[in-house]
Image (cartoon, rainbow, N blue to C red):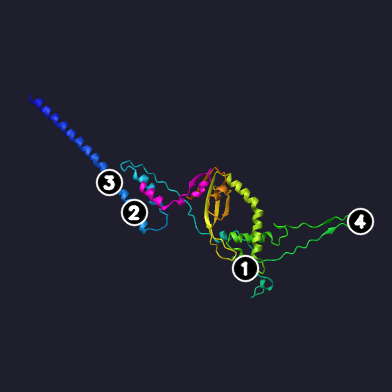
Amino acid sequence: MNHEILTNELDETTKSLIEKVEIMEKELDSKDEEIKKLKNELEFLKGVISNKNRKIFGSSSEQVDVNQLSLFNEAEKFSDSNAEKPTLEEITYKRAKKSNYIGKKDNLANLERVVIEHKLEGNDLNCKDCGEPLTEIGVKSRKEIIRYIPAKLMVEEHVIYSYACKSCEKETGESNIISPLISQTIFYNCMASNELIAHTIILKYQHAMPLYRQETYFDMMGATLSRQTLCNWTMSAAEALEPIYTNMKKELLNRNYIHADETTLKVINDNGKDSKSKKYMWLYMSETPYNTVVLYDYQSTRSSSCPKNFLGDFKGFLQTDGYNGYNSVEGAKRIYCLAHISFNNILSIQLST
């Protein structure tokens, strides 16, 4: 009898202890959830405070260190600290250190090179002490000098002669007149050589020298060339090169991926002063590093009609900034450039992660 009572009491005690353990485990789980929640709230508030401090005390630039984005801390955030560490194998290798120094030969490799040898001549080849002939024993030193040859303009006067066959003229009554062939300039009856026209265009578009300054530049070289003349040459060259531009545009639109961007352009009026109205230069570029196609399109407006008219029915990927005007290219699949992501979007990424 006593044995049964003790057994029952022991069972009751065991059952009671098990229930208490289960209750305590549930409480621990609840506490763990609460602690996890509080930690998440703490991290969120830290992010808010950090962003506030950065906005108040940090740089005004929208550029943000990529290490600050919580997206790149994802591996550390979700890693298991109790997981077994992998066995590490140390691997070593050797590599040649890359030098950033560019020597003289690399800098001057594309320049025309003239070798001038300095040797003794005449009586200098005899010894001043004994008078016997000197023997060349080698090169003492070498010295490189970059010499500047000032640009100059010159007039080529081409005198073209005509020739007639007097024998044919006596027999047939008609004279066979011929003249030698000469190289032609890009424009018929134009006094500018192809080199001068190319130089004018390069000065204007690559070196940003307006035509009114080129007028002074050429005047200092002894030639009076009005800006109207220079303008006519530039416009005529543009018309002559238009078929090449058209063919390049056709090639660009056949690509599957195009970068596009637009920027304001400072335009100078006829009086040499800056224009008050904004002008825009639109840029379209293919994606491949080889056989790259880059085209500029000058427009007086930033209207959405500009990319629409230029790209037409383009169906590929169009990578741009966030300007909505590119939505006018209805057939294109728009993708955005991360370099233009705004500061507010970066804050949203940080807070959401």
Residue at the farthest top position: 1
Tell me which numbered mark, 3 or 1, is placed earlier along the sequence.
3
The local crowd at label 4, few if under 14, some if 14 to 19, many if 20 or more residues have their Cα within 10 Å, is few
Identify the element where label 1 is drawn.
Answer: helix
The residue drawn where x is 84% and y is 59% is: 163
CA gap, disc 3 and disc 2: 18 Å
Three-letter residue code for mark 4: Lys
* Horizontal side, residue 341 vs residue 119: left or right: left
The residue drawn where x is 62% and y is 51% is: 245
Q: Is residue 202 visible?
A: yes
* Horizontal side, residue 132 vs residue 340: left or right: right
CA gap, disc 4 and disc 1: 57 Å
Report if residue 273 lies within the magenta region: no
**Residue position marked by numbered label 4 in the rendering:** 170
Q: Nearer the viewer, residue 291 or 324?
A: 324
Q: Which residues are magenta?
A: 324-353
Three-letter residue code for mark 2: Ser
Q: Is residue 14 above or below residue 48?
A: above
